[in-house]
Amino acid sequence: MEIQRIMTIVEASYQTRHIIEGALRDIDRRALNAMVLVKRHGNALAGYGVVARAFREGASDLKEAASHMQESIAPLIQAHMRILQHRSYADLFRRMRTEMAGKGLLCPTLGCTEEIWAQTIAAEEAEALNTLYILIRAVNRIQEGIAEQEYVVTNGRIEAALSEDTGAPLTRVSRDMGNAVGIVRDAIRSYRNQLEELLHESGTGF
């Protein structure tokens, strides 16, 4: 069960990273396209120019937030692997002590070693839980950035409607930007749900 949980998080982290990186590149490209359109039409698209700059700034902020998320994924997986390894050692010593006790043999050293492993596992669980909290906070920052970018998209659609007579395809640009932001939003929401499931399970130990 532990291995399956680890592999689930590894797979979810990989898929989320892949989706977000692709979508962020798309957001940045579309933001650049919007700025090119603004430059081409001059003062006629001054209002949309503010939106285009906000698109690029938002894309940069999301990219930075995503990098912080990545920094916590590897430590979380490594902590889980150490816990799994230490549990296997603790189980080995426990079986040895049980077998020896069944033969009427006592070995205090094995009991002390088992206690040391239990303390080590408890410390690793606490570290893993702390890393999980850090990762969830990083995900929160991405979600806050997404909300801000969605607000910019809404403003872009309003400015696009006001600038229809310029002939610039701003409505399409804003729609495509909204779709790209939506991809990031859905991916990170799904990942957040999986992390919260892991957090819930952590309430009774990893």
Image (cartoon, helix red, strand yellow):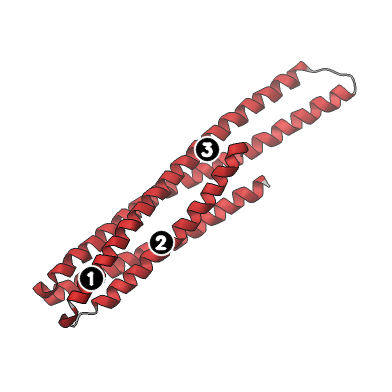
Q: Callout 1: 10 Å neighbours few (<14), some, many (20+)? A: some
Q: In the image, is residue 171 above or below residue 100?
A: below
Q: CA distance from mark 2 to mark 3?
A: 25 Å
Q: Which mark is residue 158?
A: 1
- Quarter of the figure with residue 40: bottom left
Q: In the image, is residue 106 above or below residue 149?
A: above
Q: Could you tell me residue 46's position as x and y percent? A: 12, 69
Q: In the image, is residue 145 above or below residue 198?
A: below
On the image, numbered disc 2 is attached to which residue? 184
Q: In the image, is residue 14 above or below residue 33?
A: above
In the structure shown, which secondary structural element does the residue marked by tag 2 occupy? helix
Q: Earlier in the sequence, mark 2 or mark 3?
A: 3
Q: Amino acid at mark 1?
A: Ile
Q: Are marks 3 and 1 in contact (CB under 8 Å)?
A: no
Answer whether residue 194 is visible to the viewer in this image.
yes
Q: Amino acid at mark 2?
A: Val
Q: Could you tell me residue 167's position as x and y percent? A: 18, 83
